[in-house]
Amino acid sequence: MSRLKELRTPVFWAEGHPGKLNREGWVVEVSGSCAKPRTFTWQDLIALPKSIADARLTSVTRFSVRGKWGGIKVADLLDVVKAGPKTQYVRFWSYRMIYDTSIPIEVALRERTLLAYEFDGEFLDEDYGGPIRGFCPYLWGYKSAKSVVKIELMDRYVSGFWEQRGYPDDALITAGKVRDMNQGGRLRPIPEGEVIRFLDE
Ligand SMILES: Nc1nc2c(c(=O)[nH]1)N[C@H]1C(S)=C(S)[C@@H](COP(=O)(O)O)O[C@H]1N2
Ligand SMILES: [Mo]
């Protein structure tokens, strides 16, 4: 059983669970406003420098899970494709191209924003957005698109799947209580912004 499942992390697939996905055959297209648009194979992706973010995925539905997310910094990926000065937003598309979400370039370039393929040293499975997903601990979880097939560098903002259904476009984490999955779902108060510490610590 995966660590995320052991922690009973909720599995969200608003567009329907994708079923079994082929990790070795996975490709991610990176296109839009960049000098070197390109399609990365799974082998290309895991050959890029690996970064680990010890960080939390925190959902507006009020759960938060911490672990060592491993993958490629979005900043590193944007270097490879030579993202242009016109890039204002980074748009992530999930498998089947029904779910998408966009984050501002400043957030995309921060050090813990990843294209993640691992959690606590294990490859992500389909439930949790494997083979590879967006991971952005700075914003609500709906900005962390699962099973990413395409990344588009945008010169303007386009509202995504949940944003069009009423979730805020900026997805700033607000103070309140969340269920800490690392502590059996215990309700704990969080300050606003990235969940680094709990107020009761
Ligand atoms: N493709 C896709 N990505 C998605 C979602 C989804 O429904 N479909 N849900 C989002 C939301 S609201 C959250 S909180 C996280 C949840 O990640 P998890 O299902 O791995 O716990 O994924 C985000 N990415
Ligand atoms: Mo969420």
Image (cartoon, helix red, strand yellow):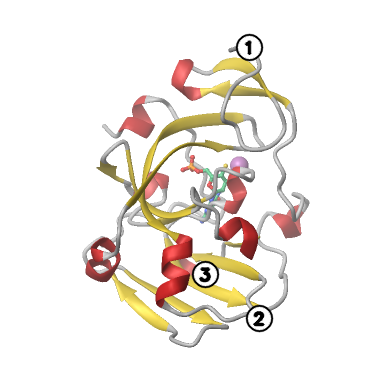
The Cα atoms of the two marked residues, 3 and 1, are separated by 40 Å
Residue that numbered label 1 is attached to: 200
**Rendered view: 147 above or below 138:** below
Question: Which of pointers 3 and 1 lies earlier in the amino acid sequence?
Answer: 3
* Mark 1 residue type: Asp
Q: Nearer the viewer, mark 2 or mark 3?
A: 2
Q: Position of residue 113 (x, y in %)?
A: 50, 52
Residue that numbered label 3 is attached to: 97
Q: Position of residue 150 (x, y in %)?
A: 47, 72
Residue appearing at x 60%, y 52% in the figure:
143
- Mark 2 Cα within 10 Å, few/some/many (few <14, many 20+)? few
Residue 86 got which mark?
A: 2
Q: Position of residue 99 (x, y in %)?
A: 57, 62
Residue appearing at x 57%, y 59% in the figure:
108
Query: Is label 3 in contact with label 1 (beta carbons under 8 Å)?
Result: no
**Rendered view: 71 above or below 7:** below
Extreme-top residue of the structure: 200
Residue 149 location, quadrant: bottom left
Mark 2 close to ligand 1, CB under 8 Å: no
* Mark 2 residue type: Lys
Question: Which of pointers 2 and 3 lies earlier in the amino acid sequence?
Answer: 2
**Rendered view: 38 above or below 2:** below
Residue appearing at x 22%, y 68% in the figure:
43
Q: Position of residue 96 (x, y in %)?
A: 47, 68
Looking at the image, which is closer to me, 189 or 25?
A: 189
